[in-house]
Amino acid sequence: MPNAHGIIPRTLRPGIYAPIPSFFLEHSEELDLQAFEKHVALTATAGVGQVLAGSMSEAIHLTRSERVALIKAARRTLDTAGLTDRPIIAGIGAGSTRETIELAHEAAEAGADYGIAIISGYFAGAIAGNKKALKAYWKEVSEKSAIPVLVYNYPGASGGINLDSDIITELAKECPNLVGVKLTCGDVGKLTRIAAVVSDPSFTSLYPRKHANAPFLVLGGYTDFILPTAMVNGHGAITGLANVAPNAVVKLFKLCEESCANPSLLSEAQRLQGIIAQADATIAKASIAGTKALLERLYGYGGKPRRPLPPIETSVAQALWDHPHTQDLVRLEQELSKI
């Protein structure tokens, strides 16, 4: 059923989603939409979902018109590839609740199916310990958004604000237009507690979502705990590593899901989880610039972050590429991409 704005979001499914980087032309720092569209196609073909204008996308460095341009380009690319049923999740977090809601409306008009909202850390000193204020942000955003919304919990990008499992499960129960959470806090215990509530068979009937095709998903923010996530009835991950090795991360997710029903697959899932977890920890230390350097090496595009975020030093980029954890991941990705 369409919502009050006439929008029917595409189905939101468990799986692997990549926060797609924003690519910039070297001298002008204008958006490089050609590279962006290539990367959307590459990740989508591997079975990875697209999250735009988030932390990896350098959303803080994007204008509102650039956010719209990226959403439109991604939708065009997916449709051209015949992936018309693939949803787009767009970052809508801003300094104020008011602007977050405005960004949600703009994202919807541009073609996004879902928004993902992080709370600003600018006034973290006044907000971090105020449960009422924290809940009020996502309540109002989800109530007034033209599209369903995911909670984005990332202390590193929000001045240390770190939602606990009680706040998140309360929001899930009280806000029918909230459809998930991304936990870039890396807290597996928190993920387990939230999944125990929202993945219980009774949750859907007691707390139905606004859209039946948009259940509440519990998603990790890294690839190093995809196996534990599956074992506690979580739903996958939104992870930067899926930009570098989309086939490997999707394979791991599928194998972990299958392992829940077929324990004979568990040892292989553990093997892949080990390779991917090691690579995730190594590559994450190099941040956005490191990921872009690896994309340049692997796929021929990547470039530099937008200033003032510094580029990776040439020697550091080479060391990242040569690192055994990176090379193990590259070999795995190359093997799987040939299957």
Image (spheres, rainbow, N blue to C red):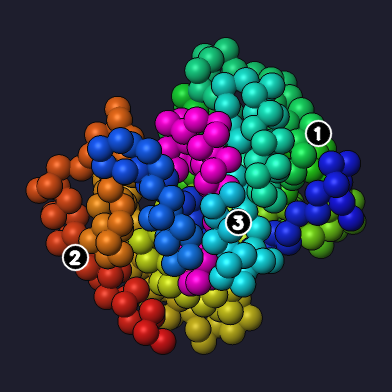
Res. 324 mark: 2
Asked whether, in this view, residue 131 is left or right of residue 257, the answer is right
Q: What separation in Å lies between label 3 and label 1 (alpha carbons)?
A: 25 Å
Q: Would residue 244 appear left or right of 231 to someone viewing this image?
A: left
Counting residues from the start of the chain, the first of labels 3 and 2 encountered is: 3
Disc nearest the viewer among 3 and 2: 3
Residue 223 in sight:
no
Residue type beneath disc 1: Glu
Q: Is residue 117 magenta?
A: no
Residues 157 and 78: in front is 78
* Other residues around mark 2 within 10 Å, as few (<14) / some (14–19) / many (≥20): some
Q: Amino acid at mark 2?
A: Pro
**Residue in the foreground of this view, choosing between 262 and 25:** 25
Q: Residue at x 67, y 36 (%)?
A: 106
**Left or right, residue 38 beside residue 175:** left
The image shows residue 136 at horizontal and vertical percentages of: 73, 24
Image position, residue 301 (x, y; %) = 30, 57
Q: Residues at badges 3 and 1 in contact (C-beta under 8 Å)?
A: no
- Magenta part of the chain: 43-71
Q: Which residue is mark 3?
A: 75
Residue 87 image offset from top left, x and y in percent: 65, 58
Amino acid type for the residue under numbered disc 3: Arg
For image coordinates 88% across by 41% down, the residue present is 4
User: Is residue 27 something one can see in this rendering?
Assistant: yes
Q: Please tell me which residue is depicted at 61% across the width and 35% down the height of the picture.
A: 92
Q: Which mark is residue 143?
A: 1
The secondary element bearing badge 1 is classed as: helix
